Amino acid sequence: MKIKQVIGITISLLGCLISLLAMGASQIGLDQDQGWGPARWFLLGTGLVLILIPHIRMLTRQSFGRIMDLSTRYFPGIESAFESIKGGIARLNELPMVGEKTVSPKGQRGFWINVQLSAIFLISVAAFTFLISVGRWTTWLVTTEHFHLLAAGFRSGQTYLAIDPNPALLELEDPYPFENRQDVDQLWDASLYNGKYYLYWGPMPALVTLAIESFGNIQVDDPHLTWLFLVGMLLINLLILRNLWSYEFDTLPAWSILPPALVMGLSNPLPWLMSRPAVYEAAIAAGQFFFLLGIYWVLVLARKPLGGTWFIAIPGICLAMAIASRLTLAPAAILLLSGFILLRKSSEQKINGSARHSFWILTAIAFTPIILGLAGLAIYNFVRFGSFFELGHRYQLTLQGLAGNYASSFSTRNILPNLYNYFLNPFRRIETFPFVKALWGSYSVPILRANASQSYHVEQVTGTLISVPFILYGVVPLLGWGRSIWKQIGDSRLGEIQISTIIPGDWGWLYLVLVVTAGLTLIPILIISYSTMRYLLDMLPMLLILASIGFAYCLQEFGQKRLNRIGFFLSGICLSGYSAIIGVLLGVTGYFANFEYFNPELFDRISRFLAF
């Protein structure tokens, strides 16, 4: 019996077992309810799908053959019509393709790539500025100034904010439960410790603020930081795209870069963050800016090593700054840097025939900035709280008092509700502008009987699969490689399967590194007892890079024929256009509908103009 048959039988038997468990759940005590709820129906459906999966190919072939037999019997001319259509498609695929590398010189292709990326960048920056200023362009709403206050504290040689807490707040026996301080003026979401205000967010945005403010008598508030880091993140994302299309996907036409560029510029939650740019958005945007900058330098240095060995430290410096902005990025940064070292050694071996530098030298140079950065953060925490590992999150003055039961801030019970909220939670459609609004997240997944922890809290959030379906392209390479491995299983033993012949070049291994890295960026926001739209930015840039690679993979692997390539391009344009439109419309409302309340005249004019 072949390996494929053994796997197929195993999957079908597993499906039978799951189906039997669903049908007999009440009898065996698995379900105390005699009725059929969503969970039992879901279990039964899963079992039936597993039973049918190994036989789908055979069933579809038989069904299609039966349909064709009936069609030719009752409609004798349909077979000749099919042959005519196939002949027309074949002739269409033989036509030359405008924009192909073989038609357009490399310089012309690069010019049109730059034109498209520049246009997307300018349009996105204009949209960001329009939203952050609620349509007034030059006048921005003031939200928070936390990082400015911390920068002022740094300027005075202290690690606490340059603002004193309300004496009434300090007189409270326990100021952390909200009900004890609800009538007292306070700096919301700051951390109160030993009579001083601190921030549990990383210090890097405050250091950037300090550097900017040193150039003159200016004040950089959190909205300015949010805009600056998001615009910088957009620029780095587009440079990553340009790098991929210039080296890894250089056979694709210039216009193929447009769909991923569009979705990187305007998809949710980027416009959403501009609708209420506060300290939270500034911290997340700073972390992603430096993290993406690290990815960009990984791409540059892994493929084309520069002259000096010390250039290898550049990705580590960028990733250390990302960690100093958002500590939850540390595991992903360490994995990405490890993948960079392996790719760099592989690149040296291809260029020189052998690795020029030892593995340990490369590792030491690359990881030194991260080690120094983590050590600096530990000292920073010790100076503030007397502990190397205390961030101050437990002392936050927020809606929930965390100091008394800090362990409740994280729970594995939150994983399934967070997965649902971040990937599948829908938006609400309305009849007037902006036509869509974000819904509040769910506290449970009834179909799986999964309830979040008691301390779980939700805000508005729209699932990425709902608002940014373009990310589905990100799984296509994995499916394609899995299909190739499946083919090899039928003709080879497991030990004879050559994975290296399936995963193409450096971009394939980089893609796998980014897949695992994206998973690590997702883990922290899945276990935290809080679900909100801004947390999508912790994972979405990585998913969009993977989706861009997947889109290019589709064009490269399945788009040799003109008709296929046009089809993939149109599907990419439709998905990216939808993602951009939904992203901007969701951003118009945001958390607090600032656009509607602070510029009602313009909002009303737009609503009447777009009224049906």
Image (cartoon, rainbow, N blue to C red):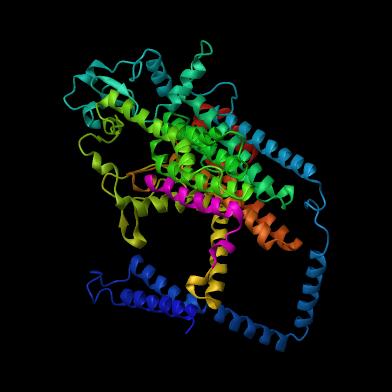
Residue 191 appears in view: yes
Q: Between 228 and 436, which is closer to the camera in this rendering?
A: 228
- Locate residue 303 relative to residue 161 in the image: left or right: right
In this picture, is 539 found above or below 314?
below
Q: Residue furthest top?
A: 217
Taking the spot 51% from the left edge, 79% from the top edge, the residue there is 55
Quarter holding residue 121: top right
Q: Quadrant of the C terminus?
A: top right
Taking the spot 55% from the left edge, 50% from the top edge, the residue there is 510
Q: Between 598 and 171, which is closer to the camera in this rendering?
A: 171
In this picture, is 42 found above or below 297?
below
Check residue 35 for magenta coloring.
Answer: no
Q: Position of residue 594 (x, y in %)?
A: 49, 31
Magenta stretch, main secondary structure, is: helix
Residue 612 appears in view: no
Taking the spot 42% from the left edge, 28% from the top edge, the residue there is 279
Q: Between 182 and 69, which is closer to the camera in this rendering?
A: 69
In this picture, is 81 found above or below 117?
below
Q: How many numbered discs sit on the rendered protein?
A: 0
Taking the spot 29% from the left edge, 23% from the top edge, the residue there is 383
Q: Position of residue 345 (x, y in %)?
A: 54, 47
- Locate residue 372 relative to residue 505 in the image: left or right: left
State the extent of the magenta-drawn residues as a range: 498-524
Quarter holding residue 320: top left
- Locate residue 606 relative to residue 98 in the image: left or right: left
Q: Position of residue 15 (x, y in %)?
A: 39, 75
Q: Position of residue 59 (x, y in %)?
A: 55, 81
Q: Residue furthest bottom?
A: 73
